[in-house]
Image: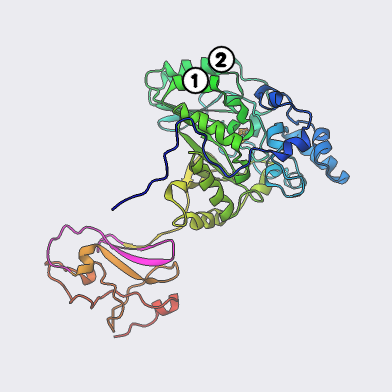
Amino acid sequence: MTHTHPPARSSTEAPETNHARANPGRARFFPAASDAEWNDWRWQFKHRVTRLEELAALLPFPAKEWDMRREVLRDFRMGITPYYLALVDPEDPACPILRQVAPIVEEYVFRDVGDEDPLAEEQYSPVPGITHRYPDRVLMVISNSCAIYCRYCTRKRIMYEDAVPDVEIDRMVDYIARTKSVRDVVVSGGDPLTYGTKKLEGILAKLRAIPHLEIIRIGSRVPVSLPQRIDAELCEMLARYHPLWINVHFNHPRELTIEAAEACDRLSRAGIPLNNQAVLLKGVNDEVETIRQLCTGLMKMRVRPYYLYQCDPIRGGEHFRTPISKGIEIMEGLRGHTSGLAIPTYVVDAPGGGGKIPVGPNYLLHHDPKKKRAVLRNYQGRLFEYREPTGRAGPMTSKARRGGGELGPVASRPVVRERAADGNGGAEAGAESGANGNGKPRRAAGKSGWVHRGRSLEERLGPRKE
Ligand code: SF4
């Protein structure tokens, strides 16, 4: 068979995206910024919108909301880079970009709901800044600062303090050095990439000097919120500390700009695998189509969709939370409808420190380990029988030889066993109808003891027809 391939892209060519370079928000909100300023990450960082007055001057809101918005800023600071603010649609009162970073009335209404530390990170902290929850890996919080402050952040509690002192970082490194079981560290914050390159290199060098530490991962939202920071100097430095991975944090397809794509491309060219950790947020990305566009867009940027997190019950983030059924619905809408590589794992981080628990639609509807038989549902709702290996080599029906077959298109409910009365099912299922204990076929092919008929549960649970 002949395969046709698209022409190979040269190693220096930027990845294709659907996004135009022109950023209308920049001209609208920051008309005085020169190109040199706009592309300078330190200028972006310094000119973050941190006060309500600044935000209101660019994106006015009703006067009656002032006090409420001011009140929630007492609980959790605001910080929005000019670049990220320029992604906001000023005509959209429910803009998913703005909703992630601006204090809103809903946050005020629910301000007392939730926990300060919903994942009990402090409880699992052997030294300040380290969370050691899983056997072979630790979280290392080296920064209290981010380029933008996300209103749903799980780690709001650490964003009030000054920079993490060097002595504390040394204590964290020391813990990893003397804990031989740790082979993987997630360096996070805050955002580690808000540090200067030299300071960050100092920390990475100390980590890389630990013989048993195999993998360094960095968690960062900087490629989303401050892509200018991903410069050549940073990428060259990071490439000296491989194997090094970066987990990025895109939540919405509108964040997949050409600037972000180029930042990710620079990291990829430095040999750094990129994985995305999105958070499922009500009013931001709680639609199948939004997450599908996000995931397939990330794939074009060579970023693997890794996790879709259920939003943690953090205090002040209640208005972002969805029921778990929403996450399952989204996963159901992805699986089979797009490439498996574009499908993240939906996880609920168990409150109280239970760790990440994967949750998803159920595709295994019935499993009989004794009879070596399973019934599976595919993404279209079609049911298939799957025969597990029995270790027997005797004669069997052709379908049994193939390992099973389709049962029929039904809703996603458990299949019940019925004895075939009319032989119309065509489901020559498992040990029941295939080879029996002595390796002989129990029935002729096509006369199955298993049949799946009808669409309703009532029908399938109805009286046997003999
Ligand atoms: S960038 Fe990450 S750590 Fe910083 S506020 Fe947002 S979610 Fe929290």
Q: Where is residue 194 drawn, in percent x and y?
A: 61, 24
Query: Magenta segment: does it hold 381?
Result: yes
Tell me the tag on residue 198.
2
Query: Magenta segment: does it hold 268?
Result: no
Q: How far apart are the alpha carbons under marks 1 and 2? A: 12 Å
Residue at 87 percent of width and 46 percent of height: 64
**On the rendered image, what quadrant is the C terminus found in?**
bottom left
Start and end of the magenta stretch? Answer: 368-396
Q: Amino acid at mark 2?
A: Lys
Residue at 56 percent of width and 33 percent of height: 262
Q: Where is residue 423 drawn, in percent x and y?
A: 27, 81
Could you classify mark 2 by the number of other residues whose Cα lies within 10 Å: few (under 14), some (14-19), or many (20 or more)? few
The quarter of the rendering in which ligand 1 is drawn is top right
Could you classify mark 1 by the number of other residues whose Cα lies within 10 Å: few (under 14), some (14-19), or many (20 or more)? some
**Of callouts 1 and 2, which one flags the residue occurring earlier in the amino acid sequence?**
2
- Where on the picture, by quarter, is residue 335? bottom left
Q: Amino acid at mark 1?
A: Glu
Image position of 275 with respect to 411: above or below: above
Q: Where is residue 436 drawn, in percent x and y?
A: 16, 69
Q: Which residue is mark 1?
A: 236
Q: Secondary structure at mark 1?
A: helix
Q: In the rendered image, is residue 184 in sight?
A: yes
Residue at 52 percent of width and 14 percent of height: 202
Of circles 1 and 2, which is in front? 1
Q: Is residue 112 left or right of residue 451?
A: right
Q: Where is residue 219 drawn, in percent x and y?
A: 53, 31
Q: Is residue 386 left or right of residue 70?
A: left
